[in-house]
Image (cartoon, grey):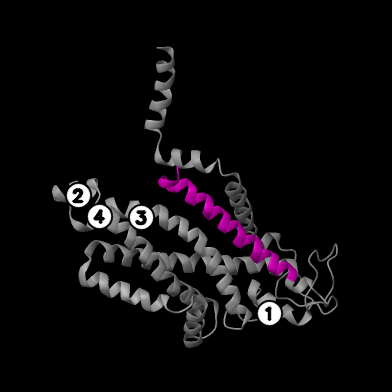
Amino acid sequence: MSELAATKPATADRAIRSPLGEFWRRLRTKRVALAAGVVLLAIVLVCVFAPWLAPYNPTTPDYQAILAGPSATHWFGTDAYGRDILSRVIWGGRISLWVGFVSVTLGGAVGVALGLLSGYLGGWTDSVIMRLADVLLAFPGILLAIGIVAVLGPGVTNVIYAVAVFSVPVFARLVRGSTLALKQSVYVQASRSIGVRPVALVLRHILPGTLPGVIVYMSLRVGTAILTAAALSFIGLGAQPPSPEWGAMLADGRSYLGVDDQLTLFPGIAIFVTVLALNLLGDGLRDALDQRLR
C-alpha cells in the first residue's frame, strides 16, 4: 500500500507537467548541449554589444602597427592595414550571425508554408511543389548559392537571399513529411469531422506538430548558412572590403599564411566555435524534442 501511495504523486506529476517543463527536463540532462548553448549565447551577446566591447574601430587603418603580432595592445594582432583583428572578429560576428539567422528564418518560413500546402492539399499541388524542390536539391547548395549571387551581384543582402533559396526545399520536404503523418492522426480527423475550417486546422493542429523538427533543423542549418556565407565572402561574392566578415577576413589573410597566421587563425576559430556550438545545441534540441528518442 505504501509503495502504491509513493508512486501515485510521481505519476500524477508526470501527467500534469507542461510540454515546456517536460522539454526543459529532458534538455537539462544534455550537458554538452547546454554548454554549447551558453557558448553560443556568449558569442551572440559579444556581437550585439560590439560597439562597447570592441577596443578599436574595425575599419580604421593604423599604418604604425601593420601586421603586429598578438600583444597587450592588440590581443589578436593586426592585419596588413594595421586594423585590430579582435575588433574585426567581434564586428564580423554581427554580419555572420545576421546572415545565418536571417537567411535560415526566411528559407524556413517559405519552406514551412510550401510543405504545409504540399502535404495537406496533395494532388497536383504536391506534385508541383515537390518537383520544384527536386530541381533545387539537384544542385549542391554552395553551387546554387554561387549561381544566385553571380546573377544578383555580390553583397551581404544577396548572400542572404541565396542561402535562403537553397534552404527552402529541405524545409519543405521536412514539413511535408510531418504534415502527411499528422493529417491522418485522430485529433486532426476529429477536428475535421466537427467542421473546423482547413486554414484553422492547418494552423492550429498541424503546424504546431511540425515545429519541433523545424526548430531542430533550423539550429543545424544556421551553422551551414554561416559556413556558406563565409565561403562566398572568401571567393569575393559575399561581404566586400573593408567589411570585417569572417570569410572575408580569411580571404584577406590567405596571402600571409605561414608568416602572419593571426590573420586567418582567429577568424577561423570564430567560425569553428560558432558552428560547433550550433551543431551541438541542435543535437541536444533533437534529443529533447523528439518523443521517439525517449
| Element class at badge 2 | helix
Q: Say which residue appears at 82% left-offset and 80% top-offset.
A: 63
Is the residue under label 3 in contact with that under label 4 (CB below 8 Å)? no
The amino acid type found where label 3 is placed reads Thr
Q: Say which residue appears at 43% left-offset and 48% top-offset.
A: 290
Question: x and y percent of residue 276 in the render?
Answer: 61, 59
Q: Is residue 150 magenta?
A: no
| Element class at badge 4 | helix
Viewer-closest of 44 and 127: 127
- Residue to which mark 1 is pinned: 251
Question: x and y percent of residue 152 in the render?
Answer: 47, 85
The amino acid type found where label 2 is placed reads Gln
Count neighbours of disc 1 (C-alpha within 10 A) and say few if under 14, some if 14 to 19, many if 20 or more: some
Identify the mark nearer the N-term, 2 or 3. Answer: 2
Q: Nearer the viewer, mark 4 or mark 3?
A: 4
Is the residue under label 1 in contact with that under label 4 (CB below 8 Å)? no
Viewer-closest of 246 and 88: 246
Residues shaded magenta: 265-294
